[in-house]
Amino acid sequence: MSTKNSFIVGFMLFAMFFGAGNLIFPPGLGFVSGDYFWLAIAGFVLTGVGLPLIGVIAGSISKDGYVESLKVVHPVFAIIFMVAIYLTIGPFFAIPRTATTSYEMAVLPFMENAGALSLFIFSVIFFIVVFALSYRADSLTNSIGKILTPFLLITIVALIIRAITLYFGMDSAPLGEGFNTDSPFSVGFTEGYLTMDAIAAIAFSMVVLNSIRDLGVNNRKDLLIGTVKSASIAAVLLGTIYISLGWIGNKVNLTPEEIGDQNSGTFILTFVSDLAYGQFGMILLAAIVLLACLTTATGLIVSVSEYFHKILPKISYEVFVVIFTLISFILANQGLEQVIQTSVPVLSILYPIAITSVLLLFVTYFITSPRLSFQVPVVLVIAVSILSVVHRNAWLEMPWLENLPFFASSFEWIPFMIIGYIAGYLIGLKKEKIKYT
């Protein structure tokens, strides 16, 4: 695949990843992390950049992506897990969030007495545009990779450069109340869950593979190389922007009282845009938000619709685009904070399972391993993740979980992943080995 095409697909992937959460969570994390900023943002970048990069590449291990690879655990698991992934990063959480974030950052600052009606009207227009962009999946690379992404990058860079000149040399903001100074890295790591990028990578990997195939690349090795190049370009862009936005949030001269009950990330970006460019800054931010959220929502609608059409071929891709656009529109009218709060427990279960699956794909690809070495750790991580979320939300008290290693850092599932792989490897030493095609 040519360098030009690698950049086109890489830009498309960057735009699909860079949506609502990617804008609002880094400055919010920077604002509360104080002098622990660099440790916190390192954890955030790992889940927001490193894992998505690995996730997209791992998807190219099998020619049919995760849909085929995860059958190593069990065909039923592959379907249930992929359905959960697609619905989470699709119509149930991520797509509605793109609309609500767009509304709060691109519309509310210019309106007085806004309410449910204004959100409804905006979301109608937003999803009409998304529907128009996603109805023809084969036009995605051109519409996003060649047209929308360059405009998105230009507007983001313009805001970041101006903000850096304003805050360069200033001290960090005071440490936020309740920030875990004992484990700032894990705070950033788990905050990165909210971007949904690591699980979105599982869905986007198939879009990337299809886009590369459309460019005439079909050889398995060339597909893998093309995916690595494109994903690396997207990762560099994402990492640079995350760190920049986080740094701006870390230096901004605001108090928690000024932010009040509003989402800190949206408030900070609106404040900085106004400070940097005045009224033009507000318009610039509105353009950034709308472009970022439109490209992400479009990519998600395409990914989800293609997957469900594949498992339910009697229903056309176009029908699924209509269905998922309507569901997303309805849920978007809950408002931003409600969408975020509802997603947290679900993501806390899915993320450990997704990370485990991606890492095991790499391990079992390079190290000849029995199926049990994949199956056992996945089952253990599923169980531990569900129990931990139940306990942390006080739905059912299980205090013994707090004695697990790394529970305080929300990494209690990691020892189970490692021990599960070793146990499964030893038990299944003489049994069937994993082969990827």
Image (cartoon, rainbow, N blue to C red):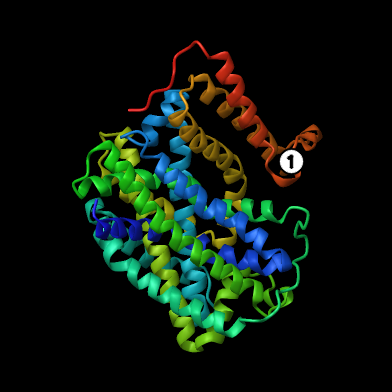
Residue 41 position by quadrant: bottom right
Quadrant of the rendering where the C terminus is positioned = top left
Q: Position of residue 428 (x, y in %)?
A: 53, 14
Give 15 or 302, whichever is nearer the viewer.
Answer: 15
- Dot 1, how many residues are within 10 Å of its Cα: few (below 14), some (14-19), or many (20+)? some
Query: Number of callouts in the render?
Result: 1
Whether residue 307 is situated above or below residue 139 in the rendered picture: above
Q: Residue furthest bottom?
A: 278
Taking the spot 49% from the left edge, 59% from the top edge, the residue there is 97
Give 305 or 361, whichever is nearer the viewer.
Answer: 361
* Residue identifier under label 1: 407
Q: Amino acid at mark 1?
A: Phe
Q: Residue furthest left?
A: 216
- Residue 318 visible in the shown view: no
Instruction: Tell me the SS state at disc 1.
Output: helix
Q: Position of residue 177 (x, y in %)?
A: 78, 64
Taking the spot 49% from the left edge, 19% from the top edge, the residue there is 370
Give 85 or 71, whichever is nearer the viewer.
Answer: 71
